[in-house]
Amino acid sequence: MILGFEGNDQPGRWPGGGSGITIGIGYDLGYVTVDQFESDWEPYLSVDALARLKTAICKTAIAAKNRAPQFTDIKIKPKDAESVFFNRTLPLHALRTEQALPGVVELPGDAQGALLSLVFNRGTSMVGDRRLEMRAIRDAVPQKDLPEIAAQLRSMKRLWVGKGLDGLLKRREAEAKLVEGGVG
């Protein structure tokens, strides 16, 4: 599901919202460190491309949008994007999901996948009104309350309704349906 929603991003196109320059399969430069980026991408990018993309690290929203045109000549190959995703990004986010949602590994596989997709997309923060549903999901996971988890994923859509981010609405719905598929 993550692959379907993320695609293979190119650095010359900013994805919108609070994102940074995103490369490969959902690899957001706005939310990584220089060391992490170099470690993950050094085998796949030229020295020049690495140096230039490092200037986008920790830049999000309008700061990232303004930088995107500087990177239109840098292309991420699909096989390189998949290698970074499966070998670096996915294991890291699986660990983050387990840390943020204790007990997630006890849920059915589909529910685990849906929550991995959620954490991959939204991160692990539990602070503030925009994270109300994240906290409710965290509390529902140890109870294995799949209907509540699905309901909270749907409730989370309130954050993006009418903001031109329909992809996020579709993603939360797909995650909710995946969780429901694990019921029974």
Image: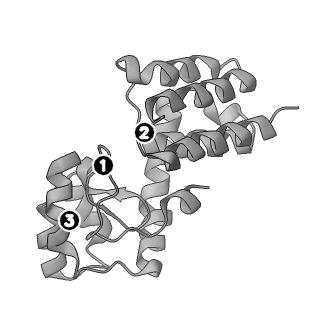
Q: Is residue 160 left or right of residue 11?
A: right
As measured in the structure, the alpha-carbon distance from the residue carrying label 1 to the one carrying label 2 is: 10 Å
Name the residue at 66% across, 24% down.
151
Q: Residue 121's quadrant in the figure?
A: top left
The one of 32 and 70 positioned closer to us in this rendering: 70
As measured in the structure, the alpha-carbon distance from the residue carrying label 1 to the one carrying label 3 is: 12 Å
Q: Which mark is residue 68?
A: 3
Q: Which residue is mark 2?
A: 122
Q: Quadrant of the N terminus?
A: bottom right
Name the residue at 70% across, 32% down.
106
Q: Which mark is residue 19?
A: 1
The one of 13 and 33 positioned closer to us in this rendering: 13
Label 3, residues with CA under 10 Å away: few <14, some 14-19, many ≥20: many
Q: Which mark is residue 84?
A: none
Name the residue at 30% across, 66% down.
13
Q: Is 36 drawn above or below residue 75 in the view shown?
A: above
Q: Is residue 71 left or right of residue 18?
A: left
**Marks 1 and 2: CB-CB under 8 Å?**
no
On the image, the x and y values in percent for residue 48 come to 13, 80
Q: Is residue 125 left or right of residue 95?
A: left
Q: Is 107 drawn above or below residue 26 in the view shown?
A: above
Is residue 162 shown to the viewer in this render?
A: yes
On the image, the x and y values in percent for residue 72 come to 23, 77
Which tag, 1 or 3, sits closer to the chain's start? 1
On the image, the x and y values in percent for residue 89 come to 43, 57
Mark closer to the observer (1, 2): 1
Q: Quadrant of the C terminus?
A: top right
Which tag, 1 or 2, sits closer to the chain's start? 1
